[in-house]
Amino acid sequence: MDRQRGHLAKNPHELVDKLTWIKIVGIGNAGVGKTCLIKHFCESKFSGGYQPTVGVDYGFKIQNVKGCELRVHLWDLSGSPEYIDVRNELYGQTDAIFLVFDVTNQASFESLDTWLKEVTKYSSGVHEIVLVANKVDTKAGKKVISTQDAKKWAQSHKMNIYEASAATGDGVLKLFDEMLNNIINKRRQAGILTSWPGDHAQL
């Protein structure tokens, strides 16, 4: 390249500033499948062995939305009560939260209000919270939370609801794609994104 040694063609700080960074947080009781949902989105695979998240887990993916590459950071917050201080430190500057319950676990559904109170208290400025009914691939006999009850709860809290299976991948891509599109649309409406590289792309 025709440049002086030790000199970059462009300032790396300027290049980083032009990237679009997204922060998404997953919450819900331990064992509901937050880690598996993130892993399936980032790596398109499922791990059947359950290992509870210790404090926090993390995923990263570059995802193309409307012709532009987003740098998506996904934070999986432990559902164990002893990690509440860790969770509260990580709610800041979050673009979206997905609140997960397990359709085979009554307690995880009954805990949704508690999780929502925690989010409301510690995550000021969050643009979007969605509800995720996970493990919908489970046989009907083991399912204890009906789709109707889940939708009723979501509607009462003005949330979108997604049915998903981290095991099969059903609904996972739709969940994250729609969250990312909604984040970008709200940023544009707020004037945070005035020019979008994908504007010329066919939607």
Image (tube, grey):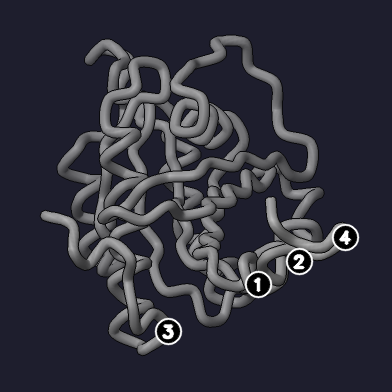
Answer with mark 4 or mark 2, whichever residue precedes in sequence. 4
Mark 2 lies on a secondary structure that is helix
First in sequence: mark 4 vs mark 3: 4
Please name the residue shown 27% across and 61% down the image.
198
User: Residues at badges 4 and 1 in contact (C-beta under 8 Å)?
Assistant: no
- Disc 2/disc 3 C-alpha distance (Å): 24 Å
Q: Which mark is residue 89?
A: 2
Q: Quadrant of residue 140?
A: top left
Q: Which residue is mark 3?
A: 192
Alpha-carbon distance for marks 3 and 1?
18 Å
State the residue position of label 1: 92
Discs 4/3, front = 4
Residue bearing the label numbered 4:
6
Residue 35 lies in quadrant: top right
What amino acid type is highlighted by mark number 3? Ile
Is residue 19 rendered to the left or right of residue 102? right
Characterize the local packing of mark 3: few (<14), some (14-19) or many (20 or more) Cα atoms within 10 angstroms: few
Residue at the image position 58 percent from the left and 29 percent from the top: 31
Relative height, residue 22 to residue 43 (above, below): below
What is the C-alpha distance between the residues marked 4 and 2? Answer: 39 Å
Query: At label 2, which amino acid type do we have?
Result: Glu
Disc 1 vs disc 2: Cβ atoms closer than 8 Å? yes
- Indicate the amino acid at tag 1: Gly
In this orientation, which residue lies closer to the viewer: 156 or 189? 189
Q: Residue 199, image x and y in percent?
A: 22, 67
The secondary structure type at the circle numbered 1 is loop
Q: Is residue 153 above or below residue 51?
A: below
User: 139 or 49: nearer the eye?
Assistant: 49
Identify the image quadrant of residue 154: bottom left
